[in-house]
Image (cartoon, grey):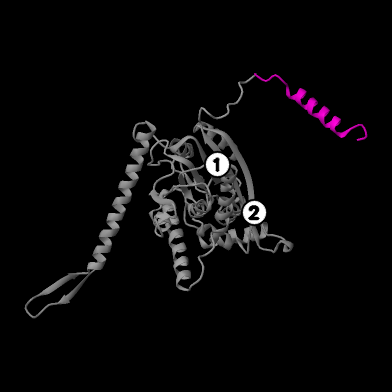
Amino acid sequence: GACCEVAGPAGGGQARLLCSTSRLRSRALNMAALRQRCGALALALARCNHAGLPRGLAGAPEIFDGRAKRAQRARKAYGRRLKEDKNARDGMPPPLPEMLGHQVTSKLLDTLFDVQREFPTVLNVGGACEEALALLRQSKKSMEKIIVADTSHDMIKKLTRSSGRDGDIEVHGLVAEEDMLPLATASCDLVVSSLGLHWVNDLPLAMQECSRVLKEDGLFLAALFAEDTLSELRVSCTLAHEERLGGVASRVSPFVRAGELGTLMSAAGLRLTTIDVDPIKIRYPSAAHLVEHLRSMAESNALQARTSLSRDVAMATSAIYDAMFSSSEDDGGGVYATYQVVYLIGWKASKNQPKEAARGSATVSLKELDRLLSDRDTSSKGPDA
């Protein structure tokens, strides 16, 4: 810590006074770093034990930097809280929810209105958990308890600070990784994850964890970004790096292929799965506004192998983006960005669920079925058709 020296009384020498504030701040930072290291070690050991593998051999490659992602989510929570407090002081209504997160979460939770079931205990995991929590509270599914799990303590504190109970619904916060949920097996009726699973290093394990905490015939709903997301930004960054530095560096995170998610869900013990791919295009005034939007969503680059971006490369990326992916004047001008959103629906395996027929047990071929349908359509039109 910093220190200062003052002259003591005559003959008394010099008294050295430590600045207590700097000293306490230094100790707090050291303790925070120690807790973070211990927490990371505990998570690693727990993941090894959970997977049943020797320590040091379990887990997927660490593609994403969990510490950076937690910091991004903490900044998102802090910025959102500042806006809410400012509006409250000024007598204004709360700020509107983030547009993309709200749109995706709203479409994801529309599935609940088609299900004639009640979900007493709900787990809301990561991503757009704030938007999901607000929409779950508004649903009419007789929910008794909502558990919000996120890797950021600041995000959990923000979501649960207003009230631990909203009407008849209890709201609990839980700081946890998506692929290591500290919940009892078969303890939840519904698991919701909106725009969070694409940042998980071990996606198969995360889906297994979501399936594990579900009760039999429990519902799993998830939305995540897939491989074609931000393809325009990826192309612009690649061309700018090649032009300015003569090489290529990763600036946009890799995303899962939509076709692989069905296999992952089946391997996790989810049945009657449904996968829907929805490309969303959003128009921005410029590439800089796109980057700002990504930061506000806590969707900035969090790769382990990321490097700092020089001003020269950033300006070249913006210029290439504006030139290659600009919208027409009829559409309002500016530039556009593509988000490929994949919606997942699955049910925990249960004895009461409909079972698919055994392979080869069909009594009518598809060709015969097509002929029967064609004959029915012809007869329904009548002789004068």
The reply to whether callout 2 and callout 1 are in contact (CB within 8 Å) is no
Q: What percent of the width, then of the height, locates residue 237?
A: 57, 54
Task: Specify whether 177 is left or right of 385.
Answer: left
Q: What percent of the width, then of the height, locates residue 271?
A: 54, 32
Describe the element under mark 2 as helix, strand or loop.
strand
Give the dominant element type of the magenta stretch: helix, strand or loop. helix
Q: Is residue 355 above or below residue 285?
A: above
Magenta includes 282? no
Q: Is residue 242 above or below residue 285?
A: above
Q: Is residue 300 above or below residue 38?
A: below
Task: Specify whether 349 is left or right of 149.
Answer: right
Q: Residue under circle 1? A: 256
Q: What percent of the width, then of the height, locates residue 2?
A: 25, 67
Q: Quadrant of residue 289?
A: bottom right
Query: In the image, what residue occupies the spot 56% across and 55% down?
Result: 102
Spatial CA span between label 2 and label 1: 19 Å
In the image, 133 versus 284, the foreground residue is 133
Residue extending furthest right? 384
Q: Is residue 349 above or below residue 194?
A: above
Does residue 91 appear in the picture of this structure? yes
Q: Residue under circle 2? A: 281
Q: Give residue 225's mark.
A: none
Q: What percent of the width, then of the height, locates residue 55?
A: 34, 34
Query: In the image, what residue occupies the spot 28% across and 59% down?
Result: 28
Magenta residues span 361-385
In the image, 233 versus 192, the foreground residue is 192
Magenta includes 383? yes
Identity of the amino acid at label 2?
A: Lys
